[in-house]
Image: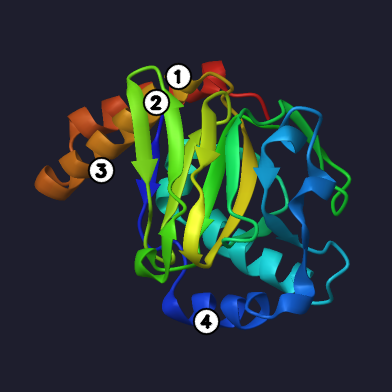
Amino acid sequence: MLLALPQVLNSQDIRSIRCVLEGDSCWRDGQASAGTQAVLVKRNQQVAQDHPSLAKLQAQVLQAMQTNTMVLSAALPRRFFTPQFNRYTPAFPAYGPHIDGAILHSRHTHDWVRSDLSCTLFLSEPDEYRGGELVIHTRLGTQRIKGAAGDAVLYPSSFVHEVTPVTAGTRLASFFWIESMVRSDEQRQLLFDLDMNLLKLRQQHGETAETIALTGIYHNLLRQWAHT
C-alpha cells in the first residue's frame, strides 16, 4: 500500500516545528545514525538526539498521526517508532537507494519496532527547494513524490526508496516507522479498502442491514489477522 495523506499537520504546527528546525545549531550529520548499507548512500542531516526541543517536536507529530483517521485505518498501528527529522540542502543533498531495517530500536522508548510501514511527513513547500523528490520503487513502477508542507506519504518499509539530490533551497521533513497489528501488506490493503467503502456506503445510505453485516466481516477479518 502506498497512500498519500493530505494535511496531517495544520499550518500552526508546521510553523512551530519549523521555528526550531530552521536554526543551524540543531543539525548533525545523518551518517552518524546510518547502518552498514545506508552509510554508503546517506548524505543528509538529522536533528541531534540531545536537542532540548526534540521531544516536543516528536510529540506534535505523534499526536497528529495517532488522531488521523486515515492513518489509523490504513496502518492499524501497534507501535510508532519515535519520529525523527531530517534536512537536505546542496551541501547535504540526497539519500541514495536503500531499504529500511526490519527491526529498529528506539532510544527514547526503548521499544523494538518492526518496520511494516515507513512514513515521510513533508515540512517544506515544494517550491522552497529544487530536487529532493521521494522516489519509491514499487512492483508497479517508480513513484516520485514531492508533497506540500503538512502532507505525508505512507508506504511499505520493504520498498527500495531514495531522496533525489537537492540542488537549491532546503527540504525539511519528519520520518518514522509503524509496526502494524496486521503484518501482511495485502491484508492491510483489503481491510483499508473495505473500511473506506463502508464509509462511503454509510454516507450515501446511512446505516443499513448490509453495512452492519459488512462491518461484521471487517471485524472478523481483523480479529483473524491482527496481533496485539
Q: Nearer the viewer, mark 3 or mark 2?
A: 2
Q: Amino acid at mark 4?
A: Arg
Please state which of residues 178 and 176 is positioned toward the viewer in this rendering: 176
Q: Amino acid at mark 2?
A: Gln
Please state which of residues 204 and 113 is positioned toward the viewer in this rendering: 113
Judged from the image, the secondary structure of the residue bearing numbered disc 1 is helix
Of the numbered discs 1 and 3, the one sitting upstream in the chain is 1
**Residue 96 picture quarter:** top right
**Residue 149 picture quarter:** bottom left
Q: Where, quadrant-wise, is the N terminus in this rendering?
A: top left
* Residue 152 at x, y percent in the picture: 45, 53
- Quick check: 33 left or right of 78? right
* Residue 79 at x, y percent in the picture: 69, 41
Q: Nearer the viewer, mark 1 or mark 3?
A: 1
| Label 1 – label 2 distance at C-alpha | 5 Å
Determine which residue is flagged by label 2. 189
Please state which of residues 19 and 192 is positioned toward the viewer in this rendering: 19
Of the numbered discs 4 and 2, the one sitting upstream in the chain is 4
Residues at discs 1 and 2 in contact (Cβ within 8 Å)? yes
Determine which residue is flagged by label 3. 199
The tag on residue 187 is: 1
For image coordinates 44% across by 46% down, the residue present is 153
Q: Nearer the viewer, mark 1 or mark 4?
A: 4
Q: Residues within 10 Å of mark 1 (few under 14, many from 20)?
A: some
**Residue 85 picture quarter:** bottom right
Q: Is residue 208 visible?
A: yes
Q: Is residue 108 above or below residue 59?
A: above
